[in-house]
Amino acid sequence: MIIDNSKNIGLYSYIGDAIGEALRFIKPNISCSSKEQRYEINSSMYAVVETSKPKELSEWKLEIYRKYIDVQYVIDGRV
């Protein structure tokens, strides 16, 4: 898990092409005024905008995905 500020998005593109593509999509396309809905990034990738109250960092649990990579981006508020 990586927890960082959006100003450092460029630092993580090396992790993989899919991560880089997702991060490059988020910054110019998703904002506080974005509708809560699913946004297609490409034929195999999408972003979901939703409003939720995040758990405290101490309450987070490890998630394991076999098929997907999950990038969570906090638009407003704090982690």
Image: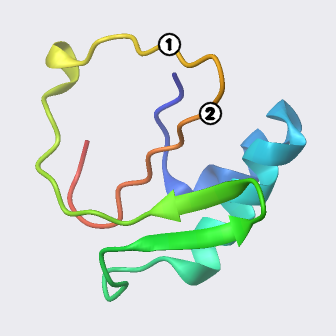
- Circle on res. 69: 2
Q: Is residue 15 left or right of residue 22?
A: right
Q: Identify which residue is drawn at 75% across, 53% down.
A: 44
Q: Identify which residue is drawn at 49% across, 40% down.
A: 4
Q: Secondary structure at mark 1?
A: loop
Q: Work out how far the residue at label 2 is from the one at label 1, CA to CA, in angstroms.
A: 9 Å
For this rendering, which residue is in front, 79 or 73? 73
- x then y, percent, for residue 32: 31, 80
Q: Secondary structure at mark 2?
A: loop
Say whether marks 2 and 1 touch (CB < 8 Å). no
For this rendering, which residue is in front, 19 or 6? 19
Q: Is residue 36 left or right of residue 5?
A: left
Q: Is residue 16 left or right of residue 29?
A: right
Q: Amino acid at mark 1?
A: Ile
Residue 26: quarter of image: bottom right
Question: What residue occupies the far bottom of the structure in this picture?
Answer: 33
Count of labels in the image: 2
Q: Identify which residue is drawn at 54% across, 73% down.
A: 39
Task: Name which of mark 2 and mark 1 comes first in the sequence.
Answer: 1
